[in-house]
Amino acid sequence: MASASAAAAAPSKPEVLTLFRSLLRTAREFCDYNVREYVRRRTIDGFRHNKDLADPSAISAAFSDGKSQLEVAKRQAVVYSLYAPEVKSVMELKR
Amino acid sequence: MASVSAASVAFRALSKPPLKSNETSRLKIVSLGWRKNGFPSLRSSRLHVSCAAKPETVDKVCEIVRKQLALPAEADLTPESKFSAIGADSLDTVEIVMALEEEFGISVEEESSQNITTVQEAADLIEKLVQKKPEA
């Protein structure tokens, strides 16, 4: 674990954007409207909040945090799909 | 003449050289496109539009960009405007590409999305993917 975090030097900009995109794509897979919107909101807020980080160790810490959250989100998307609601949320009907 | 009126409508959205808008005006007559994307199978079997994207596509892209960046209504948004010039950073660009994916039901790859810098490029990429989709 320690060697993994030491090996992960500051991620490049494309890597960060790829992580952002993966999180947003994973958000789309949730069947529950509320969780889907929350994941979108949280990733956008989180990435914007850390947009101006300059310290490489802080950047890589935030990046690995984001990666672990991505894993959590992927697992939860699968779990939620097992208990998908039968009725869609009213917010989705407006479209 | 019908083609002239279609071209004058097209000029509102597109500020492209005349020869390209001729292609799109021809396209409009064939497809009667008033709805969203119409029937892509008809278009791709008759005309292979390689460069110009349809005005409706460009309009939709512009609308999504406006909503994402919260641009005021009078802000000028032409198809040639670069995302960075209108105040969008890379995170905004990713969000815009995701919104476009959802709107048009396509899936943009990583490398393609990183090369999108202007509204017109986004519209062209969408056109290409939408045409490829029914054939897949």
Image (cartoon, rainbow, N blue to C red):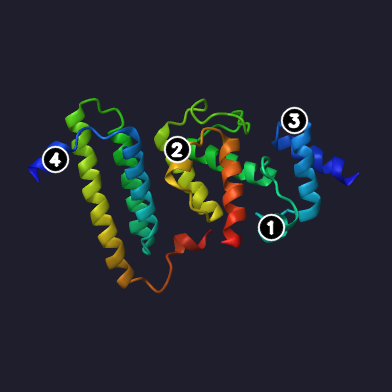
- In space, the residues marked 2 and 4 are separated at their CA atoms by 27 Å
* Residue neighbourhood size for the residue with mark 4, other residues' Cα within 10 Å, grouped as few (<14), some (14–19), many (≥20): few
Tell me where residue B64 appears, x and y as whole percent: 54, 43
Kindly identify the residue that appears in the image at 45 percent across and 38 percent down: B114
SS label for mark 1: loop
- Residue at position x 29%, y 27% from top? A52
Q: What residue type is labelled 2?
A: Gln
Closer to the camera in the image, B32 or B66: B32
Q: Can residue A66 be seen in this view?
A: yes
Residue indicated by mark 2: B114
Tell me the quarter of the image containing the C terminus of chain B. Answer: bottom right
Same chain, labels 4 and 1: no
Q: In this view, does A27 lie to the left or right of B50?
A: left
Q: In which quarter of the image is residue B4?
A: top right
* Chain letter for the residue marked with disc 1 in the picture: B
Query: Label 4 sits on what residue type?
Result: Ser
Picture residue at 40% right of the left edge, 56% below the top: A28
Tag 2 and tag 4 share a subunit = no
Callout 3 amino acid = Pro
Q: Distance between the residues labelled 4 and 1?
A: 51 Å
Quarter assignment of residue B119: top right
Q: Which of B29 and A3 is in front in this view?
A: A3
Q: Is residue B32 visible?
A: no
In the figure, is residue A23 to the left or right of B33?
left
Nearer the viewer's eye, disc 2 or disc 1?
Answer: 2
